[in-house]
């Protein structure tokens, strides 16, 4: 799946989780007003907050695929250099989170798999072949 499609998929998943989260918040409020059961409302409220958190994380990944595409990442995990085209976007920054998407799909080559990572508190995406961080 190419990055143009992936950001739309992640945005749609985030939208779905957001709608379900708002529905859970609404049902929690109705349940608490009807029964005044604090324990039940707390459980429903935790589910609602988890769904809203999932929505936010999906939108964060969608932003990485939409605006955070890189051509080359070099260096180490504690001092990575991120390049878009021929210019360095971020130099000597720490990679805070790393997730290799499609790592279990052996039919894809390194040029077809993507690496999602967070660096300088921004989401970034790079092809696995161009992610040369040791």
Image (cartoon, rainbow, N blue to C red):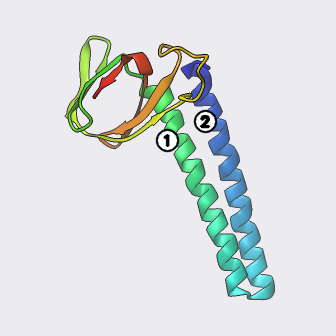
Q: Along the line of sight, which residue is nearer the eye, 133 or 4? A: 133
Q: Give the percent coordinates (x, y) of residue 64.
A: 46, 32
**Tag 2 residue:** 10
Q: Give the percent coordinates (x, y) of residue 32.
A: 73, 81
**Tag 1 residue:** 60
Quadrant (top left/top right/bottom left/bottom right) for the N terminus? top right
Residue shown at the point (55%, 21%) measured from the top left: 3
Q: Give the percent coordinates (x, y) of residue 57.
A: 53, 46
Establish if 35 lies above or below 134.
below
- For residue 48, what is the image quadrant? bottom right
Tell me whether circle 1 and circle 2 mark residues in contact (CB < 8 Å): no
Disc 2 crowd rating (10 Å Cα; few below 14, some 14-19, many 20+) is many
Please give the label number shown on residue 34.
none
Establish if 71 lies above or below 12.
above
Residue shown at the point (24%, 16%) measured from the top left: 87
Residue shown at the point (43%, 21%) measured from the top left: 128
Q: In the rendered view, does 31 fall on the left or right side of 73?
A: right
Residue shown at the point (38%, 21%) measured from the top left: 70
């Amino acid at each position: 799946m190419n990055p143009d499609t992936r950001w739309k998929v992640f945005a749609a998943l985030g939208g779905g989780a957001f709608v379900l989260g708002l529905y859970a918040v609404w049902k929690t409020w109705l349940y608490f007003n009807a029964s005044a059961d604090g324990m039940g409302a707390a459980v429903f409220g935790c589910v609602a907050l988890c769904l809203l958190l999932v929505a936010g994380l999906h939108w964060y990944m969608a932003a990485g695929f939409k605006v955070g595409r890189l051509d080359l990442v070099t260096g180490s995990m504690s001092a990575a250099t991120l390049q878009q085209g021929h210019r360095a976007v971020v130099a000597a920054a720490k990679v805070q989170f790393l997730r290799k998407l499609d790592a279990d799909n052996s039919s894809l080559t390194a040029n077809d798999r993507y690496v999602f990572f967070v660096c300088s508190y921004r989401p970034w995406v790079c092809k696995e072949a161009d992610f040369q961080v040791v």
